[in-house]
Amino acid sequence: MAIKKSLFVIFIFIFFTACVGANSTIPVVPSGEKEVVYLLHGLGRSKFAMWVLASRLEDAGFSVNNIGYSSINRSPEEILLDVSGQINETLPGNNQTVHFVGHSLGGLMIRAFLENTKIKNLGRVVLIGTPNRGTTLVDNYQDSWWMQMAGPTALALSTDKKSFPNSIADPYYPVGIIAGISEDNDNEDILPGKDDGLVPLESTKISGMTDMIIIQSNHWMLRYDQEAASQTIEFLRNARFKKHRPER
């Protein structure tokens, strides 16, 4: 099956390529004016999965709070309670602007948190490879043993109107969508149309989004991608993405 293959190769590749371009020229916030970014990883990961993006954001002058949480065999509600507690305990007490960046499930947790919590100095939000409308992968394999083992949150990511992604209100804040398109697109029967290997392109879109950009990358590599990082920084700065594709 195309979705499962080469995971080990991808894992090894990550460690050899994660830092490529990490020192590229990016805008830096002036000293004493740092803004805060809360960074959230995806399903089945830890905050270590976001260390490259965290480093790039810090190099750009942001103060980064990389939130870790357990997601296997926990419900979306349990995860949200955990994430919300960590964020609320560390929100800055001054007038610092607070941004949010999430990969995959992390983006849904950000949206759910902000639906329930209004932040005075809320800045902008970037969602990277987030299944805002769910994914047909879950629709097609929700009864399989390996999907069942992934737990209730994985099963909650379907395209059903009552699924977790579709239960979250549309954003009231500036939100930028970064979606990936995988070169390996031989899974049309599972993920119709363009996709990143896990999330259909159309499912990343959300009503009320401020801007959107598509990057040639699979779902796993989006969080390590240099262009994704640069575009994230651009949106946090200016509430828009650069529409040209930087040279790699």
Image (tube, rainbow, N blue to C red):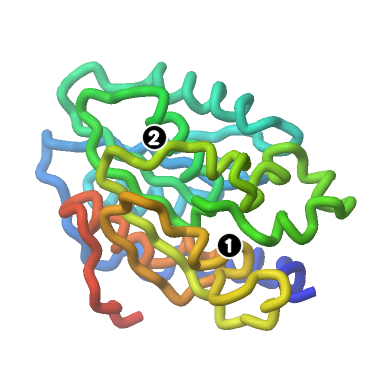
Q: Across the whole image, how many numbered discs are drawn on residues?
A: 2
Seen from the viewer's position, the closer of residues 213 and 91 is 213
Seen from the viewer's position, the closer of residues 212 and 5 is 212
Q: Is residue 87 above or below residue 5?
A: above
Q: Which residue is mark 2?
A: 65
Quadrant housing the N terminus: bottom right
Residue at the location (37% across, 23% down)?
Answer: 117
Confirm whether residue 146 shows in the render: yes
Residue at the location (63% across, 46% down)?
Answer: 43
Q: Residue 234 sits in which quadrant?
A: bottom left
Give the amino acid at mark 2. Asn
Q: Residue 233 sits in which quadrant?
A: bottom left
Image coordinates of residue 92 in percent, x first then y, are 27, 22
Q: Is residue 197 above or below residue 113?
A: below
Q: Secondary structure at mark 1?
A: loop
Residue at the location (10% across, 44% down)?
Answer: 30
Seen from the viewer's position, the closer of residues 155 and 56 is 155
Give the amino acid at mark 1. Val
Residue 197 is left or right of residue 240, and the answer is right
Residue 136 is left or right of residue 225, and the answer is right
Bin the neighbour count of mark 1 within 10 Å (Cα to Cα): few under 14, some 14-19, many 20 and up: many
Quadrant housing the C terminus: bottom left
Q: CA distance from mark 1 to mark 2?
A: 26 Å
Image coordinates of residue 202 in percent, x first then y, are 49, 65
Q: Which residue is mark 1?
A: 199
Q: Secondary structure at mark 2?
A: strand
Mark 1 or mark 2: whose residue is earlier in sequence = 2
Residue 72 is left or right of residue 80, and the answer is right
